[in-house]
Image (cartoon, helix red, strand yellow):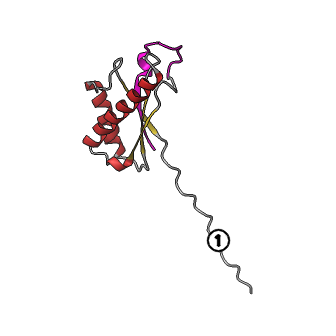
Amino acid sequence: FGVTPPPAPAPVAAPAPAPARSYLVFFDWDKATLTDRARMIIREAAENSTHVQYTQIEVNGYTDTSGKPSYNQRLSVRRAENVAAELVRDGVPRNAIAIHGFGETHLLVPTGPGVREPQNRRVEIIIH
């Protein structure tokens, strides 16, 4: 009698990576200083980053369209750097953070030039 071998086990797919989590921190006009509310949001992001396996944390700074584009670019970087520094104070390893400043590009609320739009003055923390 011929014995047939059992079928090969089906390949098991690797688990899908967890979806990215995003946090928004807003800033006063022409400021890069963190408010108490901003610190709470950053602390929450830092704490949540310890509960998931992540490969990188992006810290992306943005501005509204008031001011010159070159100034806004520098301001967006300062905002992102301040948020990243707070994440480090809250226990996130510095080498896990990528900082980007986008100035007045990628507006959350589309506006024309020279508009002070509070929702565009932000840093987005993305945990991948």
Q: Position of residue 67 (x, y in %)?
A: 43, 17
- Tell me the residue at 63%/64% (across/down): 10
- Tell me the residue at 51%/14% (across/down): 113
Q: Residue 74 lies in what quarter of the image? A: top left
Residue lying at the far bottom in this picture: please name it.
Answer: 1
Give the class, few, some or many, for how many residues have Cα within 10 Å of label 1's Cα (few <14, many ≥20): few
Which residue does the numbered mark 1 point to in the structure image? 8
Q: Nearer the viewer, residue 29 or 87?
A: 29
Q: Is 3 left, or right, of 111 in this rendering? A: right
Q: Nearer the viewer, residue 33 or 45?
A: 33
In the displayed structure, 4 sits above or below 93; it is: below
Q: Nearer the viewer, residue 103 or 85?
A: 103
Q: Is 83 left, or right, of 126 in this rendering? A: left
Q: Position of residue 11 (x, y in %)?
A: 61, 64
Residue 21 magenta: no
Q: Position of residue 119 (x, y in %)?
A: 43, 19
- Total number of numbered labels? 1
Residue 111 magenta: yes
In the displayed structure, 13 sits above or below 17; it is: below
Q: Which residues are magenta?
A: 108-128
